[in-house]
Amino acid sequence: MLQLILYLILVFALLFFFIFMSVYGLSMIFSSAMGAPYVPTKNKLANEILKEVKFKKNGLFVELGSGDARIVRTAVKNFGVRGLAVDVNGLLILWSKILKFLDPRLRGDDKLAFETGNILKTDLTKSDYIYLFLFPALIKKLLPKFDKELKKGTIIISHGFEILEYKKKLIKKVPRNTFPTYYYKV
Ligand SMILES: C[S@@+](CC[C@H](N)C(=O)[O-])C[C@H]1O[C@@H](n2cnc3c(N)ncnc32)[C@H](O)[C@@H]1O
């Protein structure tokens, strides 16, 4: 009897593992197909990237293509802003919400919101700060939206990729061993 129970537990564990891996794999393919694969910014860079900006208290920080929302979570926790994490991958948004819940400094804080959806459809009119770690082709698609919706003075932080069309708006470039970070003021 005990053997049968152990056998069933093993079968269910394996089944759960394979289902989870399939859903995870499919969600990663979906992310890539929508414009950028899930490659997180290095955790240890979050504070370094953000400390270059003078944040105003309660300004709205939007991470477009947020993955596990590590940058916007750090911004809300350490830099006094409100945050919005937007990702097309519902699994990553669910994981971000779990990470928020597990963090005593963020749990129950209504300063950090989440949105599952295409960043090309997100309302950006209230943003004060935008964070991107996206492929240039997807950034290019965002530019007409930036031109139309962003308030004057909004800061765009683009990690990894320069926005060539915004050369005149560049205020700072911070080189790093891996990806540089570009800061723009619109
Ligand atoms: C390179 S990762 C960056 C993740 C996170 N910003 C970071 O720096 O750790 C790009 C993210 O963009 C998301 N993404 C790709 N295309 C998208 C789209 N059209 N709308 C919303 N999110 C998208 C992917 O799911 C992925 O999580």
Image: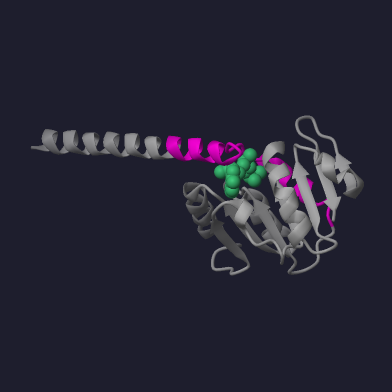
Q: Is residue 1 left or right of residue 25?
A: left
Q: Is residue 170 visible in the rendered structure shown here?
A: yes
Corner quadrant of residue 153:
bottom right
Which residue: 37% across, 39% down? 20
Q: Is residue 158 left or right of residue 74?
A: right
Name the quadrant of the N terminus: top left
Corner quadrant of residue 108:
bottom right
The structure's colour scheme is: one colour
Name the spot of residue 55 as percent of width and height, x first: 81, 61
Compared to residue 32, the image places residue 97 above or below, namely: below
Task: Please provide the residue range marked out in magenta.
Answer: 25-53
Name the spot of residue 74 as percent of width and height, x first: 68, 54
Seen from the viewer's position, the closer of residues 131 and 52 is 131
Ligand 1, what quadrant?
top right
Seen from the viewer's position, the closer of residues 87 and 15 is 87
Name the spot of residue 172 as percent of width and height, x first: 89, 45
